[in-house]
Image (cartoon, rainbow, N blue to C red):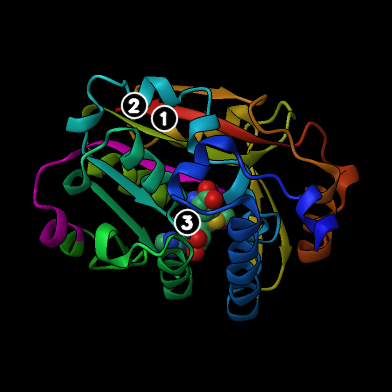
Amino acid sequence: METVLQEIEVDKPLYQLFPGMTKQEIVNRALMIRKEAMEKESPHRCVEGLFFLKETLYRNSFNAEAFPKDSLPNLRIFEVGSCFGVALRKLLLDGASRSNIFGIDVSDTFVRLGYQFFDDKASFGDRIRVLNVLADNFFDVVREWAGPEPFDVVIANLVFHCLPDHNDVLAERAYSLLKPGGVLIGQTAAYSKDTDEPFVFGMGPRKAVLHSENSFKKLIRSHGFQTVKVNFNDHPMEKEDIQWMSRHYAFDEKETNGLSLMSFIAMK
Ligand SMILES: C[S@@+](CC[C@H](N)C(=O)[O-])C[C@H]1O[C@@H](n2cnc3c(N)ncnc32)[C@H](O)[C@@H]1O
């Protein structure tokens, strides 16, 4: 156990989400929910790689632009693909208002394990619900829950690459959720090739997509966003991440270079 503890990092700011708990207790709980998530859900690198302990939205270089400290309490924030809900809980801690944050995930397992991880069902309530962003009744459900007012920020962190056949729907829905001047922020798997076309890879139903800077900007602009900025340097992919991709998607790393979890921000 000691060896494992030495290897696993827990980002300092995340300790505040586990009041009174030691690093050992946090890591033990993380390993427990990871185990159940891996048994019950299709594989996600962010789960297996414990990204939820070391890499969240606040590391995105556009974070301060999307969430200016002074206006944070008034921002209406919608997150697609919340998974265990680290990003929204951290925003709450930083000053966002509980009644202004709304998260969804298609996996009831991830949503449930999030409440187990943070042990906060009573205080966090139902700020993250089970919903498919692609569902026909998506906007009806969101309007009934969050009201008709548009959002200031939509978060889609590490979600575009999971939905290779539905990037247009995701971009279009994010645009519709936002008010004019609102922003879409997140990260997606990308590579440094100078191409206008995304690279879809994988076998059978399990596919993923790598964007280039150009292909992502083209996608986002085609749905009406006015400006798109990207940054390749916030989260370069580690060797283990690339090996994981090879294992799960028959991914040939020779076909790509400059792999990164590219940060982006787009303004409506
Ligand atoms: C790679 S994980 C990223 C999780 C989290 N946003 C993060 O940054 O660590 C992708 C998440 O998107 C969710 N997801 C995938 N397809 C979805 C869909 N159609 N609707 C809602 N959530 C979806 C998955 O269940 C998973 O939790």
Q: The N terminus appears in which quarter of the rendering?
A: bottom right
Mark identifier at residue 221 = 1
Q: Which residue is mark 2?
A: 67
Does any atom of ligand 1 lie closer than 8 Å to the CB of label 3?
yes
Inter-mark Cα distance, 1 to 3: 16 Å
Q: Earlier in the sequence, mark 2 or mark 1?
A: 2
Inter-mark Cα distance, 2 to 1: 22 Å
Who's the residue at 69% across and 30% down the image?
Answer: 195
Q: Secondary structure at mark 3?
A: loop
Of 226 and 184, nearer the camera is 184
Vertical placement of residue 160 versus 131, above or below: above
Q: Residues within 10 Å of mark 2 (few under 14, many from 20)?
A: many
Expressed as whole percent of the image width and height from the top left, the position of residue 90 reads 40, 41
Q: What segment is highlighted magenta in the picture?
A: 142-165
Residue 234 image-quadrant placement: top right
Which residue sits furthest bottom? 40
Disc 3 marks a residue whose amino acid type is His
- Mark 2 touches mark 1? (CB < 8 Å): no
Disc 1 marks a residue whose amino acid type is Arg
Q: Secondary structure at mark 1?
A: helix
Whether residue 164 appears in this view of the structure is no
- Mark 2 touches mark 3? (CB < 8 Å): no
Disc 2 marks a residue whose amino acid type is Phe
Q: Which residue is mark 3?
A: 166
Whether residue 210 appears in this view of the structure is yes
Expressed as whole percent of the image width and height from the top left, the position of residue 71 reads 22, 23
